[in-house]
Each structure stands twice: as C-alpha cells, then as structure tokens.
Image: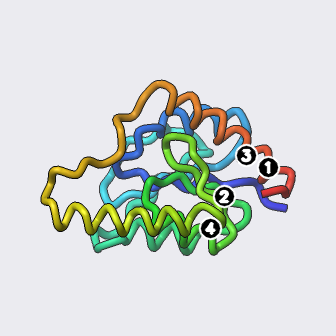
Amino acid sequence: MSAPVILVDADACPVKEEIYRVAWRHGAKVKVVSNSRLRVPDHPLIERVVVSDGFDAADDWIAEAANAQSIVVTADILLADRALKAGASVLAPNGKPFTLASIGPAIATRAIMADLRAGMGEGVGGPPPFSKADRARFLQALDAALVRVKRGLA
C-alpha cells in the first residue's frame, strides 16, 4: 500500500500551513496545486504543481491524480464530487468532510445559491468568514483522515 498523498486545491486555500504541519507529522506527501507559483516550504514531502491558467486546470489535475490513497483539500464542491468518485477522501478547509452521501445535497445547494445570486444580484452572501474553530476542526479532520487512509479504512 502506498503512502497517503494530500492534494491541495491551493488557490485561496486558508489552511496550507496546517496541512504542512500535519503532513510532516504523518510523513505524508503534499502536492500543492495551483495555476500560479505559490511559495511552499522547501521540504522533500512538499511538491508544488503549477498548472496552466486554463479554466479548471488545477481541478482537472487534482481529479486525475485523486485515488483511494489521496486526501483532497478543496472548497470547490464540483471538484470534491470528482475526487470522491475517484475514491479519494475529501475535506473542505473548514474541516467538514465531503462524502458520497453529502455531495449530492451540496451540489444542489450550490446550484440553488447560484440561481439566487443570478436573480438577486450580489446581495446573496457566500460562506461565513473563516474562523479559529474552522482551523481547529480542519486540523482534527485532516489528522483523522490520514489515519483512516493509512489503515486502509477511507
């Protein structure tokens, strides 16, 4: 069994530093995927992957790389769906897991919110601001996900 790999949808990811810390503790590889050159630690477990700036290029790369040994970190619901279908574990940056059971309702809610925004203009808000509780929840969820993947339980 290969070691877990954390695939990070890195553009606008607020928990990259937390990902590095947890990955180092578990000896897990991290692939930081973006369409621009982001700073990443100089560490053998961390790899920067810069994709083209084409629409969804980072998402496409992550979806193709995702498998049962992967943990994908993304706030993108459609990418989460693709990663789940590839067998990956998926976490939002706030620590909430995407699962096969939860992804359908999440996609439906996303579509409803898009329709509301289109009909009402920009007055319909997005997600709440990122909090310390979100960061703590993410740390716990990533640690637990790595343990599950290592044990083959994901």
Q: Secondary structure at mark 1?
A: helix
Q: How is the image coloured?
A: rainbow
**Residues tagged 3 and 1 counted as in contact (Cβ below 8 A):** yes
Q: Please tell me which of labels 2 and 1 falls first in the chain.
A: 2
Residue type, mark 3 in image:
Leu
Left or right of 36 in this view: 144: right
Residue 141: image location, x then y, percent? 65, 40
Residue 54: image location, x then y, percent? 29, 73
- Report, in whole angstroms, how far the alpha carbon at label 2 lies from the one at label 3: 9 Å
Q: Secondary structure at mark 4?
A: helix
Residue type, mark 4 in image:
Leu
Say which of 138 and 150 sits in front: 138
Residue type, mark 2 in image:
Ser
Residue 96: image location, x then y, percent? 57, 45
What label does residue 148 carry, if any?
1
Q: Secondary structure at mark 2?
A: strand
- Report, in whole angstroms, how far the alpha carbon at label 3 lies from the one at label 4: 16 Å
Q: Which residue is mark 2?
A: 89
**Residues tagged 3 and 4 counted as in contact (Cβ below 8 A):** no
Left or right of 103 in this view: 111: left
Of tags 3 and 4, the one toward the viewer is 4
